Image: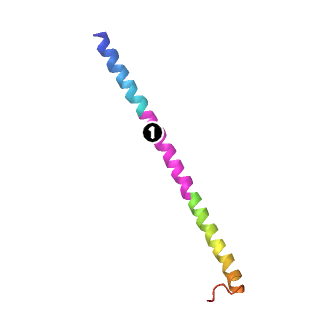
Amino acid sequence: MLWPMIAVALGFLGIAVLGVLAVRVFVEVRRLARQVGAASARIQRAAEDLERAATPLAASLDLTKK
């Protein structure tokens, strides 16, 4: 009777460890998603700034007229 109880306890501990690791992965994925979102917003702002800066330069070089 001792061995089945030990097997059940070890099985439960194994599932508990997997649950803890799953929660840690979930938290890290959420943090990574927030960082990717922030980086995407910064890239979008930089692209808009670049477009605003390039428009007068292109107009002065007559690159927009064809």
Say which of 29 and 55 sits in front. 55
Tell me where residue 51 appears, x and y as whole percent.
63, 75
Direction left: furthest residue: 1
Residue 33 within the segment the image draws in magenta? yes
Tell me where residue 35 appears, x and y as whole percent.
56, 53
Q: Magenta segment range?
A: 19-37
Residue at label 1?
Answer: 23
Direction top: furthest residue: 2
Q: Residue at x 37, y 20 (%)?
A: 10
Q: Residue at x 66, y 72 (%)?
A: 50
Kindly state the secondary structure of the residue where label 1 is placed: helix
Q: Residue at x 61, y 68 (%)?
A: 45
Q: Is residue 38 left or right of residue 23?
A: right
**The quadrant where residue 3 appears:** top left
Direction bottom: furthest residue: 66
Q: Judge the density around disc 1: few (<14), some (14-19), many (≥20) Cα neighbours within 10 Å.
A: few
32 w.r.t. 49: above or below: above
Tell me where residue 55 appears, x and y as whole percent.
66, 80
Instruction: Describe the colour scheme in one phrase.
Output: rainbow
